[in-house]
Image (tube, helix red, strand yellow):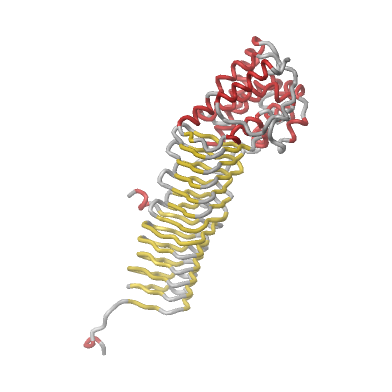
Amino acid sequence: VSRGSLLPEGIALSGEIRGQGDLIVAGSVEGPIQIDGHLVIEATGSVRGEAKARAMVIRGTLLGPAIADETIRLEPGAKMVGDARAERVSVIEGAMLRGRITMTGPQASRRTAAGGFAAPVSSPDDAVRPAERAPRVPASDSRARAPAPIDERGMAERAMAERANDSRAMAEPPIPGVARSPARRAPERTRAASTAERPAEPESTRPSTIPAGSGALPTAGGPGSVPSPSIAAALAPRVPTGVLGASRDEEESSGPSTARFLRPADLAVAVPGEPPAAPRSRGPRKPPEPVIPGVGRQRARRKDGGGPA
Amino acid sequence: MSSRSVEGVIGPHLVVRGRLDGKGDLRVDGVVEGEIELDGALVIGPDGTVAGPVRASTVEVAGEVHGSVHADSAVSIRAGGRVQGDVRARRIAIDDGAALHGGIEMDFEIAERDEP
């Protein structure tokens, strides 16, 4: 823990913390935290104030907004009141949250695809990222292929995707909880992605740039190979997913929230089968979409009904 | 508690502003701008800096302290350590190579007869 810091249980700080390196808070902090490493708020830890870090794992209490460059993960026992913003945000069942979640996603997926971030700096929560990423890969694959209208095809593709996943998975440690979310996303987005209409994020410029078709082919070709544009394209679709959280105001989601995140996975299956609806312009869609499962379904329906029409 | 056995660390490159207090041991390798009051051992590492008054059960200074240092039992200023402020404790050790600008106050009594 050379560059790490620890505020142990029993010690309280009223003031601010800034700087570089990782920080574990097991005591209490009343004031803002801003570091460039990983921040872990342990079960005994509490922070009142804004927390900014590269990545965050919260098992304790956070009263205040959380902003991370990469990931925020709320683990069981976490109690958070405030908005969470990061490329990726995950909420494990048992965590309590009241606030909005904003995922600024696409970039994250790309990086992942590129493999650039495969190995984060060692820290307690390292595991988190790999896990989150691992799942995505598969999703991208499925997505890329998903465009195929036929169910059967979809299945086959999916199978292939899974294989691909496996190979990739080896490289990146899979995390159960996180893994699913990507899957669900993949299906939904399949079509949308190709159309290049990411609802919300302006940031996600790249995805739109890449032709959906091209993306699909390359992906199939070599999973492990270079992070080609194809992969990027595949990943791009997710962006919207990330955006989902935006609208979730003031929801109190403890167990439920988690469930929501995961449930969508189920939906995924249904989606792939759907015919590649006409590329409706999704762009116009309102960026903030509720994380609620129901919403996801609605979307799916839209695609079915509205899209083709 | 287990937590107490664990030493808190303010790592290098970390800046803490405000007041730190509580029970437990703490090591400062970064910067603390503010007051520290601990029921435990405080160690200020060679690269550590504290700007503010410090109080703990024991204090070991290998870095820098700008402010008073008050320990319930002992204060030691290691070689390379620098203290700008008054030091107060029952026992105080200042190693060769340490720098101290300030007063020292040690609690002890002198019986008159003991004096030469």
Q: Residue A43: where, in percent of width, then height?
A: 42, 43
Quadrant where the image shows the C terminus of chain B:
bottom left
Q: Residue at x 65, y 20 (%)?
A: A142
Residue A240 visible within the image: yes
Please identify the quarter of the rendering in which residue A60 is found.
top left
User: Which residue is outermost to the bottom?
Assistant: B116
Please identify the quarter of the rendering in which residue A194 is found.
top right
Residue A114 visible within the image: no
In depth, the one of B92 and A309 nearer the eye is A309
Please identify the quarter of the rendering in which residue B60 is found.
bottom left
- Left or right: A167 in relation to A8: right
- Left or right: B64 in relation to A166: left
Q: Residue at x 32, y 73 (%)?
A: B90
- Left or right: A276 in relation to B46: right
- Left or right: B98 in relation to A181: left
Residue A170 lies, with reference to residue B22, above or below; the image says above
Q: Residue A118: where, in percent of width, then height?
A: 61, 36
Q: Residue A280: where, in percent of width, then height?
A: 74, 22
In depth, the one of A202 and A159 nearer the eye is A202
